[in-house]
Image (cartoon, helix red, strand yellow):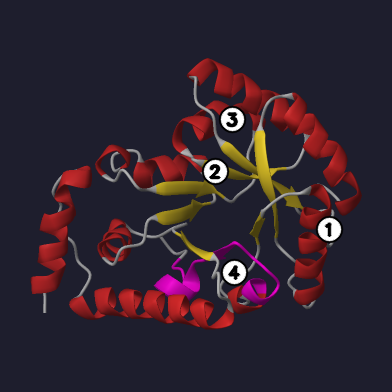
Amino acid sequence: MARLAAEISLRLSPYWGFCAISMTDTDITEIAKRRRAILDELSDISETPPVLVAVTKTQPDEALEAILLDGQRVFGENRVQEAYEHWEARRESIPDLELRLIGPLQSNKSEDAVRLFDVIETIDRAKLCRELAKAEEKTGLKRTYLIQVNTGEEPQKAGVSPDGVEDLLATAREHGLNVVGLMCIPPVEEPAGPHFALLAKLADKLGLNQLSMGMSADYDLGARFGATHVRVGSALFGARDYSA
């Protein structure tokens, strides 16, 4: 039972140093099966299926190893510090890795985010644009950005209101940021379809070509409304364990 787990640990040890892992071959197989089923479903929905972004928030190294071995290379993280713990040691050893920040970004974490992430999906205010521009200048790194839109205009949620997207896009571009798309998280108590439709309409109006929309519960709907990226966590890895 432990043979496949040991093989994965050995094959991936150059990424981060050797460590024996505790996942069973059943766990590893289930992650791969879920990933391939989601990819097949997305391909059935669209001739140009969205990119599957594996959300690795709270996931252990064993789960990352398993999905890396299955070929996954695009990952989403919610928190900058946790993302460093997951990926800093792996970055140089996985040249085709793409990391996307999908959680709110504090302005004082801008430089850390620019150093690690290829794409930051959560621009939502002018101050953050300024800080990201400073971080790019300091580090010499150019990154790609999406604007997070609060399509439900929920006061407790990050994101710019739909009416403010155009002005924020102009501000980001004034600061030299390469903004290519929009992202949203619909209200949990409302149907997601109208929110995805609104995001697609805004992106089309502004000439933006990336749409990050759809998560574990509704990635298929996101694909039907034209998502270029879907952010999937629990549907890949199983329910998260927050007890640790």
Q: Name the residue under label 2.
A: 119
Q: Mark 1 points at which residue?
A: 154
Residue 110's disc number: 3
**Part of the protein shown in magenta:** 222-241
Q: Residue at x 54, y 70 (%)?
A: 49
Percent from the top left, x then y, of residue 225? 71, 72
Identify which amino acid the numbered label 3 is placed on.
Answer: Ser
* Viewport quadrant of the N terminus: bottom left
SS at mark 2? Answer: strand
Which mark sits nearer the N-terminus, 3 or 1? 3
SS at mark 4? Answer: loop
- Asked if the residue under mark 1 is in contact with the one under mark 3, i.e. CB atoms within 8 Å, the reply is no
Which mark sits nearer the N-terminus, 3 or 2? 3
Percent from the top left, x then y, of residue 243? 44, 64
- Callout 4: 10 Å neighbours few (<14), some, many (20+)? many
| Real-space CA distance between mark 1 and mark 4, rounded to the nearest whole angstrom | 18 Å
* Viewport quadrant of the C terminus: bottom left
- Asked if the residue under mark 4 is in contact with the one under mark 2, i.e. CB atoms within 8 Å, the reply is no
Q: Residue at x 58, y 39 (%)?
A: 144
Identify which amino acid the numbered label 1 is placed on.
Answer: Glu
Which mark sits nearer the N-terminus, 2 or 4? 2
Q: Mark 4 points at which residue?
A: 215
